[in-house]
Each structure stands twice: as structure tokens, then as C-alpha cells.
Amino acid sequence: MKWSRLVLAVVLLVGFASVASAESAWVLWSQYWKIDVKPTGKLSDFGIKLWEVQNAFEKRQQCLGKLERYISSLETLYEGKKPADVTRDEYAGRKRLHVRSDKQKEILSAACLPETVDPREKK
């Protein structure tokens, strides 16, 4: 009888621990990528890439709401700049804003990721 209580206690403890870990925080990451445009019109392979943490949230839905507001605010900011072509898309769960002029292309993107995921390149 004592063994069955001990086994039950261990099973419940493991079950509660797994539920708690599933409720991790969500981090809003932003990426800025600047690429130079060659005189031929082709994009160069070299550019500036920068990932930054914007904020953290308890729930994924909160993060996604802020992500949409963040991209919309950038879109509004860049649409006023001329001569720039501004387009928006979504790729692999990231919302992206493409700003292209004659000399450069900027890609601004944002993603909501669990706090355990770091999108920066490992060196």
C-alpha cells in the first residue's frame, strides 16, 4: 500500500512539472537586415543582420498581438519615406516588411518564440 502511494505521488509530481514547463514565456524578437544593392541591380550577399528582443509575454496570443502592432508601426514609418518600395509578407511564422530603394534593401521582421528558443546564429 505504501508503494502504491509513493508511485502515485511521483506520477503526479512529474505530471505537474511537465504542465508547468509547457507554460513558458513567449519572446518577441525583431530582426533588421540591411543589404546593399549593386549597380547591376542585384543584391549583395553581405549585409547587416541584427536580432533584438523587443519584449516578453506570458501568453503566445499576447506576443502575437504585439507583433502585429510592431510590424504595422514600422510599415507606417517606412511608407512615408520616398523613394522606397514597401511590401509586407509572412514567412516561416515571421511577419516581414521589405523596404527597397535604389541603393539598399532592408528587411525588418518579427517573430514570437518560446523563451527557450534563440534565433541568433550560433558561432
Image: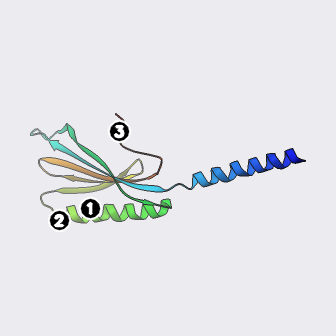
The answer to which of 112 and 89 lies nearer the viewer is 112
Mark 2 Cα-neighbour bin, 10 Å: few <14, some 14–19, many ≥20: few
* Mark seen at residue 121: 3
Q: Which residue is mark 2?
A: 80
User: Whole-percent x and y of residue 60?
Assistant: 49, 59
User: Whole-percent x and y of residue 25?
Assistant: 49, 56
Q: CA distance from mark 1 to mark 3?
A: 24 Å
Q: Residue at x 21, y 41 (%)?
A: 47
Question: Viewed as shown, does residue 117 lie left or right of 123?
Answer: right
Q: Amino acid at mark 3?
A: Glu
Question: Viewed as shown, does residue 20 lie left or right of 49?
Answer: right
Total marks in image: 3
Q: Which of the two marks, 3 or 2, is nearer to us in this view?
A: 3
Of callouts 1 and 2, the N-terminal one = 1
**Rendered-image quadrant of the C terminus:** top left
Q: Secondary structure at mark 2?
A: loop
In the picture as drawn, the residue positioned furthest to the right comes out as 1
In the picture as drawn, the residue positioned furthest to the front comes out as 2
* Rendered view: 63 above or below 107: below
The answer to which of 29 and 73 lies nearer the viewer is 29
Q: CA distance from mark 1 to mark 2?
A: 10 Å
Q: CA distance from mark 3 to mark 2?
A: 32 Å
In the picture as drawn, the residue positioned furthest to the left comes out as 39
Q: Which residue is mark 1?
A: 74
Q: Residue at x 84, y 50 (%)?
A: 5
The image's colouring method is: rainbow
Q: Amino acid at mark 1?
A: Leu
Question: Viewed as shown, does residue 19 lie left or right of 82?
Answer: right
Mark 1 Cα-neighbour bin, 10 Å: few <14, some 14–19, many ≥20: few
